[in-house]
Each structure stands twice: as C-alpha cells, then as structure tokens.
Image: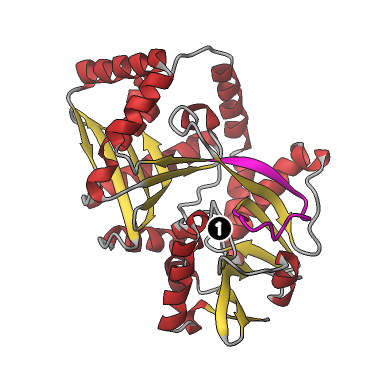
C-alpha cells in the first residue's frame, strides 16, 4: 500500500467520485465534513488543503483531508468548523492509522470528533465523547411522538413554551431552506454579537470564513451546499441555524437566538420545529455534534460515540494541567491559529482575546449561575 499527499486542487473527477462513494459505503462517514466537497470548498477560500490518499494495487482505498502546519503538526480540514474527522476508506481495508498519518507528514493532530469505526487508532491517547445525532428516517412526526412517550412532562413543557411564545411575540413561522439573504445576515450577526458579549473568539471574522459561508448559502443543490433554517414569532427572528448539508445529512454550524426570546427557551422550541419540518427538504439526519449536552440530549436520546484528543506518532494524552487555566489559554491559541491562516489575523485575534478577558469572566459567572437553577427545559 502506498500513501501520497497532494493538494485538493489536484484531485481528478474520478478520485472525487471515488471518495464520495466510499462515504456512502460506510454510514459513519456520511457527514459532509469528511467528504471531498467540503475539502474543495475550504481549499477555494483558504488554499492550504492537502489530501492523503492510500492506494492499493493502483486503486484508491482511503482519503483524508487536512491542513499541514509546521514541525509535523496537522489540523483538521476547515477547522474550527470541522466537528468530525475521519479517514474515509474502503470498508474492508486494514490500516495502521498512525503510520498512515506519518506517511502523509503528520506527526501530531488534535481531533475533537474522530470517527474510527475500524479501530485504526485504538492505541492513540484518545477519550470517548458523545456526538448528538437525530435520525428522521421514519419521519419527524414519529420522532416527536417517541420523544413524547419517553418524557411526557418534557413534551408538555415544550408545548407550553411554544404557546407562550406565540401569545407574547406572535404566530410561529418556521422556514426550512430559507433563501432570504437578510435572514442569513441576521443569524450571523446574532452570533457575532454573542461572541462579543461573551468575549469568545469571533470565528466568523476571517475573510475566508465569510466567503465560505456566502458560497454555501448560494448553493441550492441538496447534494452539497448550505442550509439556513429559521424560526419567526410574529415580526421577530427568534432563532436560526446555518450549516452544511450533503444529501440527507445536515450539519448546522451557526445557531443563533434573539435575546428577546430567551424567556421562551427558543433553542428547544426551534429543535422541535426542525424535527417536525426538516423532512420537507429531504433531511434525514440532523447532526448536532458534540457539546451542550443538556438540551441536545433531550432530542438525540441515542448519541454516537466519537474520540477526542491527539493522534499521530507524537500524540500526547490530555493531562490535568492542560485542562486548567493553562489549558484554557492553549485552547484559545489553538483556535486562533486554526481560524486565522496569516500572522496579521492571529495578532488581531490575540489582542482581542486579551482585551475581552473581563467579558469572558462575567459570561462564565452567568453560565455557572444558570447551571445552578433547576429547569424543566
């Protein structure tokens, strides 16, 4: 078996089709984030995407897209928007994942949601984490009824919140596949405002991210493109989600809510509406990725297990020190380095991180207060 590394731009149409075919052959690889079209999209606006290709007897059997940094360090393609990582491969392939990465020039890479159904990274210092995924293959109505039967009290409270929202803000209107550019601008601006208020890094600021989002929004082919879903109550844009879809698999990235709607728990009201209506545009899987388990687990009651940590020959385990204050600083620096390809952008984001520290402390305190309050939401 031979491993070669080329620019994504050098892929032939046959290789792109082969990569997409391998995705379809293994259900775990269905996410658009590990396929060829996402890698091509990121390459179009960042220009630094490589793909490692394993070939056996002249036939491509595995693909893995990534950004190569210095000293053998790699980053998942499209980071920090790459919630999943995977070597997309032939189902019958036997492979040493670490050796594959080494031949591609990657000695170490941090992963947040590694899908490894064939166990190629069993010896890596990884920790399991939950990914929240909703299957709508039986229809949204069936999914909601199962959720109601599992937790009638929760379902009753959900109806109460939706009714209260309608009474106080106006009739609920849900739009799947919203094509209004002003709606996209509003959803993105709400997220930018949230980043500013909480002192988090604005990952929507870099020009390549803005261009990628606009490109996705302009793609209406359900085979691969962007998807904006919005919830209105009267004249208010209550909530919206924008992300990438490939066929029936939808992966939202940006989830925003109007501050005026916070008393009505807009997040779970939005998700219930999305479960009910997503099949109207052919969505069969809603992938909510990792984190924020409190509200995601109410809808995705059978989460999938993925791996987080580091892979590669120089991979190290996450220590206690790395999870404390030093670890938080390191994570912020890693985030800045992944989203800002050039030095000027990294300096800008670094200075913003320093000046926004007081806002982060305030936001963290508010979050801890909310966690101490019991809720039926």
Q: Which residues are magenta?
A: 115-131
Query: Where is residue 226 shown, x and y percent of the image?
Result: 33, 56
Residue at the (52%, 12%) spot, across then down: 374
Residue at the (53%, 33%) spot, across then down: 292
Is 224 located above or below residue 367 in the figure?
below
Can residue 242 be seen from the camera position used here? yes
Q: Residues within 10 Å of mark 1 (few under 14, many from 20)?
A: some
Looking at the rendered image, the quarter that the C terminus falls into is: top left
Horizontally, residue 115 falls left or right of residue 107, namely left
Q: How is the image coloured?
A: secondary structure
Q: Is residue 177 magenta?
A: no
Residue at the (41%, 75%) spot, across then down: 17
183 or 96, which lies in front? 96
Give the quadrant of residue 257.
Answer: top left
Q: Is residue 122 magenta?
A: yes
Can residue 265 be seen from the camera position used here? no
Horizontally, residue 179 falls left or right of residue 145, namely left
Looking at the rendered image, the quarter that the N terminus falls into is: bottom right
Residue at the (58%, 87%) spot, across then down: 58
148 or 290, which lies in front? 148
State the SS at label 1. Answer: loop
Horizontally, residue 164 falls left or right of residue 96, namely left
Is 362 located above or below residue 72 in the figure?
above
219 or 159, which lies in front? 159
Query: Where is residue 131 shown, x and y percent of the image?
Result: 54, 42
Query: Where is residue 29 shown, x and y percent of the image?
Result: 51, 58
Residue hosting label 1: 79
């Amino acid at each position: 078996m031979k491993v070669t590394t080329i620019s994504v731009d050098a892929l032939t149409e046959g290789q792109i089709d082969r990569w997409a075919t391998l995705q379809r052959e293994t259900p775990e690889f269905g996410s658009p984030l590990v396929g060829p079209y996402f890698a091509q999209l990121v390459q179009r606006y960042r220009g630094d995407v490589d793909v490692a290709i394993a070939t056996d007897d002249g036939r491509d059997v595995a693909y893995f897209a990534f950004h190569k940094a210095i000293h053998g360090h790699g980053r998942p393609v499209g980071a920090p928007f790459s919630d999943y990582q995977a070597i997309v491969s032939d189902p019958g392939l036997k492979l040493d994942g670490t050796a594959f990465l080494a031949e591609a020039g990657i000695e170490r890479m941090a992963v947040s949601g590694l899908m490894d159904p064939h166990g190629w990274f069993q010896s890596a210092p990884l920790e399991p984490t939950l990914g929240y995924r909703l299957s709508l293959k039986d229809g949204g109505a069936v999914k909601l009824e199962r959720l109601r039967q599992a937790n009638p009290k929760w379902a009753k409270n959900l109806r109460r919140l939706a009714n209260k929202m309608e009474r106080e803000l106006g009739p609920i209107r849900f739009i799947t596949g919203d094509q209004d550019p002003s709606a996209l601008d509003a959803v993105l601006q709400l997220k930018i405002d949230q980043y500013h208020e909480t002192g988090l890094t604005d990952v929507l600021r870099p020009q390549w991210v803005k261009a990628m989002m606009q490109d996705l929004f302009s793609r209406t082919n359900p085979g691969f493109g962007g998807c904006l879903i919005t919830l209105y109550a009267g004249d208010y844009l209550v909530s919206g989600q924008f992300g990438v879809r490939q066929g029936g698999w939808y992966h939202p990235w940006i989830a925003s809510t109007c501050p005026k709607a916070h008393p009505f728990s807009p997040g779970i009201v939005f998700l219930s509406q999305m479960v009910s209506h997503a099949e109207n545009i052919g969505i069969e899987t809603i992938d909510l990725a990792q984190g924020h388990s409190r509200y995601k687990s109410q809808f995705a009651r059978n989460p999938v297990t993925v791996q987080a940590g580091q892979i590669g020959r120089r991979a190290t385990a996450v220590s206690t020190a790395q999870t404390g204050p030093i670890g938080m600083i390191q994570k912020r620096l890693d985030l800045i380095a992944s989203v800002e390809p050039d030095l000027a952008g990294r300096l800008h984001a670094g200075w913003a991180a320093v000046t926004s520290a007081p806002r982060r402390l305030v936001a963290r305190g508010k979050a801890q207060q909310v966690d101490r309050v019991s809720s039926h939401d």
